[in-house]
Image: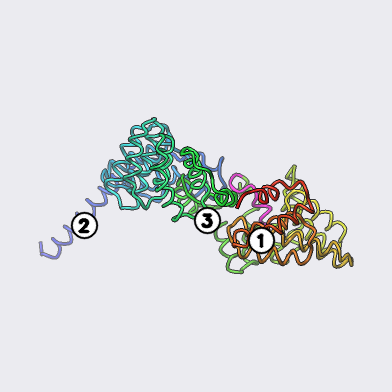
Amino acid sequence: MNPRARLLRLLVGVEIAVAAVLFGLRLNATCVNTPLVEQYSDSATGREIASLPDQFLFDSAAKFRSLGQVYLAFGYFSKADACLRRAAEFEPSNAETAFAHGFCLERLGQIDEAITLLRRAAERGSARLADEAWYHVGRNLLRLEQADEAAAAFERAGESHSPSVYQRAKLLVRSGRADEALPLLDRLASQVPNELHVMQLREQANRALGREIDAEDHAALERAMPGLKLDDAPGFLSAVRDRFGLARDVAQVNRDRQNGKHAAAAARMIELIRDGTGWTNRYPWLLQDAAALQLESQNVAAAKPLVDRLFLEQRCPTPKAWESRGEIEFAAGNVSQARDAWEHALRMRPTSDVHLRLASLDRLAGDAINERRHYALAGQLAGIELFRANKIAEAHRTLRQALAIDESLPEMWFHVGETERLLGHPGEAAAAFRRCLELNPDHPRARARLDRKP
């Protein structure tokens, strides 16, 4: 036999052997029974998750890690546990698999094993993953009422991991060591200014030390907003959920909307809310958003049946639904019905936009007094929103502009006083608080500001 024929036979034999091995691997690959996703999610997500095992021909770490993370993200914890255990058999040193598995076992109440896996992830993973893993170790130790061990875990998460620093400060305050907690809280206050949890804990620490709470701290606490992510589950899981079905499509709609492609966004939204897509399982307000998008695109004809559906299908239509109904009635020339709808929305939830719409109706009706009042109320709400967002200079400017339209609103004067006070104008602040009390003698916060010692 010549060498060429011998080589050809050898290659054919190798190919047959490889094919036999692959066939055996495929034949023995684990058949994963997917959960009943379509019963609890939209149909597109259900189909995609149900077909996910078919993307992997053979058993591998990637297969079971991917399936485990997806099942974890959608709340199928037992199936996620099974898949992540198989993934760990293939890659026992993989830190991300260990972290996801520990995260999963937390939710199944298997705390001891979760702690073991999270420690493993912290020891083998990147610096970022290690910080998050130690934070979860601390949280689980707290569930076991092991406060000292939890504090040590939070400390290992590092000084730059703000949630862990906060937990350390909280444990110190609870254990009667508030003086040690204050430096941590001061550091957090510089990292995450005007953060509600930090400011509340700092006030609690000062009270524990018998210190009088400063008036400025009280005022700042009123404007504080939660910004410290003490539970990272939404971010960790949403990164997976957002890759599937309706979540992915809604994200694309929002991107189109942000980029000014309102017509494309509106058309895509109509496709998402067609019957049979199961959208109500995931996004109960999607119909309302679809109607608003049509109105943004100036497509009133397409918006009307959507708004009609809102009132038929919702036993208690939202303020946004009433607002959309008002826009449709106004576009049809039904001014009286538009006013009724917008006033209904206003009673449910006052917003600047609705006041501006009512002001435009008053202008058409030649009612200058109510027109000015609605413009002033729109400015008041916009100014208060800026004030609560700690944009004091912008709030002051907006409120002063609204005050030039209508000086008869006591709440406006109170917030003007607050902005003047925070901008370092005590005389102007006191004058504003006094004017507020002239208009409303029973305004408690204005009275408290005037009665407070400098």
The residue closer to the viewer here, 3 or 388, is 388
User: Cβ–Cβ below 8 Å for labels 2 and 1?
Assistant: no
Q: Mark 3 points at which residue?
A: 248
User: Cβ–Cβ below 8 Å for labels 3 and 2?
Assistant: no
Q: What residue type is labelled 1?
A: Gly
In the rendered image, which quarter is residue 40 located in?
Answer: top right
Q: Residue at x 47, y 37 (%)?
A: 208
Colour mode? rainbow
Q: Residue at x 10, y 64 (%)?
A: 2
Instruction: Estimate the spatial distance between the alpha carbons at disc 2 and disc 1, rounded to whole Å.
Output: 96 Å
Q: Where is residue 388 in the image (x, y as percent from the top left)?
A: 61, 55
Q: Is residue 371 magenta?
A: no
Q: Name the residue under label 2.
A: 12
**Residue 427 bears which disc, if any?**
1
**Main secondary structure of the magenta stretch:** helix
Left of 205 or right of it: where is 161? Answer: left
